[in-house]
C-alpha cells in the first residue's frame, strides 16, 4: 500500500532531470474543483515561481523531497 504524504509550506523538493533545481513550497491552494496546488519558488532565484498540482509534486519520477518542514 502506498503511503500518502502531505505537502506543506517550507518543504524543499528537487526536480529530477538535467534542468533540475531546488524548489521551496511557499503556499498551498485549492482550485474551484478542489484540486490542491503548490506554489513554489526556486531556491537559487526566489523571483522564479511556479505552480504545480500537489499530485505532480508527489510524483517520485518528477520530484524528490529534500527537507521536511
Image: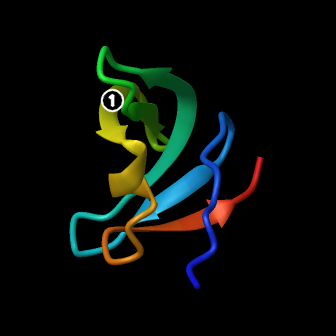
Task: Measuring from the top left, give residue 17's x and y in whole percent.
Answer: 25, 75
Corner quadrant of residue 2 = bottom right
57 in relation to 30, above or below? below
Left or right of 49 in this view: 9: right
- Residue visible at 42% across and 45% down in the picture: 54
Identity of the residue drawn at 31% across and 14% down: 32
Q: Is residue 53 above or below residue 41?
A: below
Disc count in the image?
A: 1
Residue 46: x %, y % from top left? 46, 29
User: Quick one: 53 or 62, which is closer to the camera?
Assistant: 53
Q: Is residue 41 above or below residue 19?
A: above
Say whether residue 62 is left or right of residue 58: left
Q: Does 31 appear above or below 40?
A: above
User: Furthest-top residue in view?
Assistant: 32
Residue 53 pos. (x, y %): 34, 41
Q: Which residue is mark 1?
A: 48
Q: Who is closer to the viewer here, 36 or 27?
A: 36
Q: Position of residue 18 (x, y in %)?
A: 22, 74
**Residue at disc 1, secondary structure:** strand
Amino acid at each position: 500500500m502506498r503511503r500518502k504524504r502531505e505537502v506543506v509550506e517550507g518543504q524543499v523538493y528537487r526536480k529530477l532531470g538535467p534542468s533540475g533545481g531546488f524548489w521551496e513550497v511557499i503556499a498551498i491552494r485549492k482550485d474551484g474543483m478542489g484540486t490542491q496546488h503548490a506554489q513554489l519558488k526556486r531556491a537559487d532565484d526566489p523571483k522564479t515561481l511556479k505552480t504545480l498540482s500537489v499530485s505532480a509534486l508527489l510524483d517520485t519520477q518528477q520530484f524528490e523531497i529534500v527537507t521536511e518542514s
